[in-house]
Image (cartoon, grey):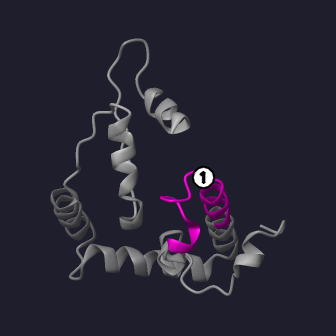
């Protein structure tokens, strides 16, 4: 907790206002209670309003007739398939994230086995992988 609170505090310098935005998976929601126990001002972010705004901007900019998330996912998949270097960097970033997540101290909240690894991989641009947990922890990545 102290590490996270310190990082949040770094958003404000020399008496200036700071803001920290935290994204949590549903199984990590208990972390909000831990933050509140430490007297941190927590406000829920209405992602539906933001999503609608971004959806409209993307659809108008790219003149697409499909949901923005489907369009962006297809574009990311095409880049990953066509660019081997990009795919390797995506895998390294994915593995780096998994390693960092596994080192988090509060296993009640941050438990790697509770993560949806396929969805997580997609968020890194990895749409099909045979990367096992053993490989993920190897020195190759």
Q: Which residue is mark 1?
A: 104
The residue drawn where x is 39% and y is 58% is 24
The 10 Å Cα crowd at callout 1, few under 14, some 14 to 19, many 20 or more, is few
Above or below, 18 relative to 116 = above
* Residue 101 as seen in the image, left or right of residue 138: left
Quadrant location of the C terminus in the rendered image: bottom right
Above or below, 34 relative to 15 = below
* Residue 121 as seen in the image, left or right of residue 135: left
For the record, the magenta segment spans 95-114
Q: Depth check: 46 or 34 in front?
A: 34
Query: Does residue 6 belong to the magenta stretch?
Result: no
The residue drawn where x is 33% and y is 31% is 39
Residue 1, horizontal then vertical, whole percent: 51, 39
Residue 50, horizontal then vertical, whole percent: 20, 56
* Residue 56 as seen in the image, left or right of residue 114: left
Q: Depth check: 78 or 42 in front?
A: 42
The residue drawn where x is 56% and y is 58% is 107
Above or below, 6 relative to 115 = above
Q: Depth check: 20 or 38 in front?
A: 38
The residue drawn where x is 40% and y is 64% is 25
* Image quadrant in which you'd find residue 42: top left
Residue 95, horizontal then vertical, whole percent: 67, 66
Query: Does residue 103 belong to the magenta stretch?
Result: yes
Residue 82, horizontal then vertical, whole percent: 60, 81
Number of dots carrying numbers: 1
């Amino acid at each position: 907790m102290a590490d996270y609170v310190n990082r949040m505090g770094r958003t404000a310098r020399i008496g200036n206002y700071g803001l920290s935005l935290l994204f949590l998976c549903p199984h990590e929601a208990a972390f909000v209670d831990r933050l509140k126990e430490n007297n941190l001002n927590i406000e829920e972010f209405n992602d539906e309003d933001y999503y609608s705004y971004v959806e409209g901007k993307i659809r108008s900019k790219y003149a697409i007739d499909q949901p923005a998330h489907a369009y962006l996912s297809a574009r990311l998949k095409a880049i990953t398939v066509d660019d081997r270097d990009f795919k390797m960097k995506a895998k390294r970033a994915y593995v780096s994230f998994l390693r960092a997540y596994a080192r988090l101290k509060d296993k009640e909240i941050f438990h790697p086995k509770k993560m949806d690894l396929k969805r997580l991989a997609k968020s890194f641009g990895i749409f099909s992988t045979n990367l096992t947990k053993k490989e993920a922890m190897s020195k190759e990545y």
